[in-house]
């Protein structure tokens, strides 16, 4: 999976899951199901990702492992978030955080990658500067618990969270610095399956800043990985961004083609979190 060969990894993951199921090893089976869910998520098979995550929770209930259950709940919440089911996602995230408190009462917030998912969700539903600042405070807490042992992936998502929040707060200088650090860090981490998200996020920021050369370069880099690895989830975001990029360059015909591609991919993947963005894009194309 670290090499980005996502589709090739599905069968081995399923085989491992079946083996641990036959051995009645619920803990390992839950881990296998979560790994399978991660593959399906990146591949844009969101319904299959949800099924795999719910299966993981069943194994967690069988094993009685609270920490594993917390991890599975956080994964389910982020899948529901991508499916556009915001209310259920918020409820499951809250339950995951309650389980986190049972695992370690000293750390009341979801942290690491799970914390990044929750922050991304909170940014999605934030309505004012107070909400955005709360996300910043949460990020500072959950990602700086232990700087000396913090994995590069966690550091990358910490800076991505800051960058997105600063962008929402209309603080472009701080946002630009954080985006650059986030991209540099995910490159060092070598986690190919997460890289497109970082480049596309920075590209979106660059389009807003009318820095079209940098935006074009980031979209191109992201698309190289997306196409090579079959990452349909990120292909939706890339298509939407390419449409906005073309609009910024006064090319509505090509923008419309990218919008149509995004619409097709959303229908195919179930990535309905992007329904609103697509609707706004279509309205812009009419104007």
Image: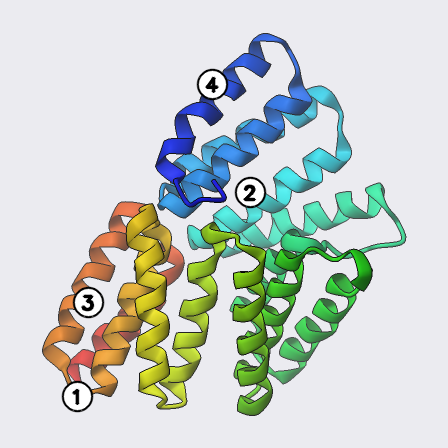
Residue 13 vs 124, above or below: the answer is: above
Q: SS class of the residue under badge 1?
A: loop
- The x, y position of residue 53, in whole percent, is 53, 35
User: Which one is in front in this view, the residue at disc 3 or the one at disc 2?
Assistant: 3
Q: Which residue is mark 3?
A: 258
Can residue 270 be seen by looking at this rendering? no
Q: Earlier in the sequence, mark 1 or mark 2?
A: 2
Q: Which sits earlier in the primary sequence, circle 3 or circle 1?
A: 1
Q: Nearer the viewer, mark 4 or mark 3?
A: 4
Cα–Cα span, label 3 and label 2: 30 Å
The residue nearer to you, when weighing 81 against 214, is 214
Q: Secondary structure at mark 3?
A: helix
Q: On the picture, is 252 further left or further right than 7?
A: left
Labelled pair 3, 2 in contact (Cβ < 8 Å): no
Tell me, yes or no, whether the two marked residues, 1 and 4, touch with CB atoms within 8 Å: no
Q: Residue at 17% of width from left, 75% of height from top?
A: 255
Give the CA separation, mark 1 to mark 2: 40 Å
Mark sitting on residue 64: none
Residue under label 4: 15
Q: Nearer the viewer, mark 1 or mark 4?
A: 4
Q: What label does residue 250 carry, if any? A: 1
Q: Residue furthest top?
A: 22
Circle 2 crowding by C-alpha within 10 Å: few under 14, some 14–19, many from 20: many
CA distance separating discs 3 and 1: 14 Å
Q: Residues within 10 Å of mark 1 (few under 14, many from 20)?
A: few
Image-based side of 33 in relation to 61, left or right: left
Tell me which residue sits at (64%, 23%) in the image: 28
Binning the other alpha carbons within 10 Å of mark 3 as few (below 14), some (14 to 19) or many (20 upward) gives: many
Q: Quadrant of the C terminus?
A: bottom left
Find numbered disc 2 in the image and state the secondary structure of the residue it sits on. Answer: helix
Question: Can residue 135 be seen at all in this image of the molecule?
Answer: yes
């Amino acid at each position: 999976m670290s090499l980005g060969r996502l589709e090739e990894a599905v069968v081995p993951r399923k085989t491992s899951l079946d083996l641990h199921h036959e051995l009645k090893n619920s803990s390992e089976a839950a881990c296998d199901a979560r790994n399978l869910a991660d593959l399906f998520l990146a591949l844009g098979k969101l319904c299959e990702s949800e099924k795999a995550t719910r299966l993981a929770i069943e194994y967690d209930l069988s094993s009685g492992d609270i920490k594993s259950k917390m991890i599975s709940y956080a994964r389910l919440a982020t899948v529901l978030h991508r499916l556009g089911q915001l209310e259920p996602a918020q409820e499951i995230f809250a339950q995951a955080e309650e389980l986190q408190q049972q695992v370690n009462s000293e750390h009341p917030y979801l942290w690491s990658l799970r914390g990044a998912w929750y922050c991304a969700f909170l940014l999605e539903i934030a309505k004012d500067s107070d909400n955005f600042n709360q996300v910043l405070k949460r990020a500072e807490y959950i990602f700086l618990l232990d700087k000396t042992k913090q994995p590069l992936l966690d550091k990358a998502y910490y800076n991505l969270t800051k960058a997105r929040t600063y962008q929402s707060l209309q603080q472009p200088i701080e946002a630009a610095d954080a985006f650059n650090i986030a991209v540099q860090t995910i490159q060092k981490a070598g986690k190919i399956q997460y890289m497109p998200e970082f480049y596309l996020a920075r590209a979106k920021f660059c389009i807003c800043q009318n820095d079209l050369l940098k935006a074009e370069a980031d979209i191109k880099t992201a698309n190289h990985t997306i196409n090579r690895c079959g990452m349909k989830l990120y292909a939706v975001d890339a298509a939407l961004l390419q449409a906005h990029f073309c609009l910024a360059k006064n090319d509505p015909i090509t923008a419309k083609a990218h919008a149509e591609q995004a619409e097709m991919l959303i229908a195919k993947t179930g990535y309905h979190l992007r329904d609103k963005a697509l609707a706004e894009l279509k309205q812009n194309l009419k104007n």
